[in-house]
């Protein structure tokens, strides 16, 4: 299976880079255990190892371990200067201890980038980044829950979310024949001034991103809204915005974003492979006798087998309570409505 490509966009300060710290502190300096209730409560241990690529052209490769908050007890408060790509391998010890379950690459765009994308400054970097965005399997749109809670007018809400630029980006780009999952990631959920009422936050997002959501629905994609914290509760001193000296760093919602993103992408891939195989099976007898046909069919069936196996493993953390606890809502094309509400 190819790497799952996840793009992170959102205004400067919305918490994209801190989210990567959370990935590191959840899966690299820590790990996630999930019990499979359907199989004797067998426990699966999920862990990530960064993958070091030899060369990369358009975006540079970064190492998420640099951002660990658990290790340096510091928020990287500097704005990201360049778009960076982080390549990670997700392991499930019951799948294999040596082979990753799948590869995931995160692309961290600097906050101001969406503006450039819609302003038609078409330098090579902008073109590359736009292509990366359009080729992503999952788009994470970051929303600072502190700013979103505090906003009082429609203007303040759209400024907090950067929704005008993101709406324009969706409106002016063609995502033909492309399946994508969009997750609105509410960050900084640990802060005491964030409203506990998920519906208020969700309504504000749905309203501000009306255009984007219309395009998501028209394309038959799934979207969801999820609450996260890169550090966990009671870790940040609200007065100084510093990590308190002996607080325990326990990020939440971050694992849900990852499991959700992988699950959606892999299950869509399985559906697509089934479709391609059944399309081919409808070919004429003459075509079917060709060696080319048989080779192609063999490749597709092997791909389906492999992808289906990954799906069976990733379904376990996806179905666990962790994901549904942080998911505020999920809207799928087939259901035509909100299918999960919590919080
Ligand atoms: N309380 C709390 N604060 C957070 C959290 N995540 C980020 N922050 C705060 O938000 C600031 C900005 O976060 P970044 O991750 O750097 O934001 P960014 O989206 O990468 O910004 P650019 O790189 O400029 O695009 C951090 O320095 C923290 O002060 C969180 O989970 N909880
Ligand atoms: Mg950043």
Image (spheres, rainbow, N blue to C red):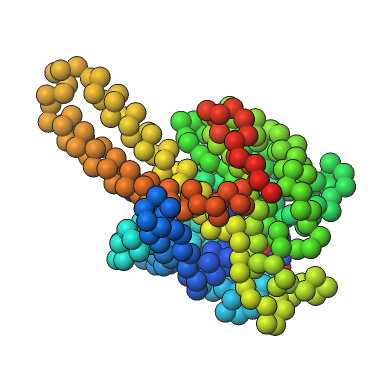
* Residue 275: x %, y % from top left: 34, 28
78 is higher (above) or lower (below) than 317 = below
* Residue 260: x %, y % from top left: 51, 48
In the image shown, does 59 or 106 lie closer to the viewer?
106
Q: Is residue 178 left or right of residue 306?
A: right
In the image shown, does 278 or 296 lie closer to the viewer?
278
Residue 173 in view here: no
Residue 231 in view here: yes
The quadrant in which residue 280 appears is top left
The quadrant in which residue 88 appears is bottom left
Q: Residue at x 84, y 53 (%)?
A: 150
Q: Residue at x 70, y 73 (%)?
A: 235
288 is higher (above) or lower (below) than 57 = above
* Residue 83: x %, y % from top left: 56, 59
Q: Is residue 274 left or right of residue 193?
A: left
Q: Residue at x 75, y 37 (%)?
A: 207
* Residue 221: x %, y % from top left: 54, 34
Q: Residue at x 58, y 53 (%)?
A: 8
Residue with the most extreme right position: 152
């Amino acid at each position: 299976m190819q790497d799952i490509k996840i793009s992170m966009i959102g205004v400067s300060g919305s918490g994209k880079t801190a989210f990567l710290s959370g990935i590191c502190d959840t899966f690299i300096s820590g790990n996630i255990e999930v019990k499979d209730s359907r199989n004797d409560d067998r426990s699966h241990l999920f862990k990530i190892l960064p993958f070091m690529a030899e060369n990369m052209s358009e975006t540079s490769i970064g190492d998420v371990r640099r951002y660990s908050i658990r290790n340096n007890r510091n928020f990287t408060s500097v704005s990201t200067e360049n778009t960076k790509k982080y390549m990670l391998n997700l392991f499930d010890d019951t799948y294999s201890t040596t082979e990753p379950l799948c590869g995931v690459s995160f692309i961290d765009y600097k906050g101001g980038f969406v503006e450039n994308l819609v302003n038609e400054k078409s330098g090579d970097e902008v073109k590359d980044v736009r292509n990366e965005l359009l080729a992503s399997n999952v788009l994470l749109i970051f929303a600072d829950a502190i700013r979103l809670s505090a906003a009082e007018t429609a203007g303040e809400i759209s400024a907090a979310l950067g929704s005008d630029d993101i709406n324009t980006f969706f409106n002016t780009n063609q995502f033909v024949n492309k399946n994508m999952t969009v997750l609105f990631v509410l960050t900084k959920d640990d802060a005491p001034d964030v409203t506990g009422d998920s519906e208020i936050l969700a309504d504000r997002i749905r309203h501000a991103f009306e255009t984007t959501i219309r395009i998501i629905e028209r394309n038959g994609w799934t979207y969801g809204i999820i609450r996260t914290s890169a550090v966990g509760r009671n870790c940040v001193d609200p007065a100084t915005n510093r990590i308190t000296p002996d607080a325990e760093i326990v990020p939440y919602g971050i694992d849900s974003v990852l499991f959700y993103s992988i699950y959606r992408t892999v299950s869509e891939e399985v559906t697509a492979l089934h479709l391609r195989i059944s399309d081919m099976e409808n070919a004429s007898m003459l075509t079917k006798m060709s060696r080319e046909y048989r080779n192609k069919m063999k490749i597709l069936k092997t791909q389906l087998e492999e992808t289906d196996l990954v799906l069976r493993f990733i379904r376990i953390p996806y179905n666990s309570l962790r994901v549904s606890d942080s998911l505020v809502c999920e809207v799928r094309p087939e259901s035509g409505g909100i299918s999960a509400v919590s919080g």
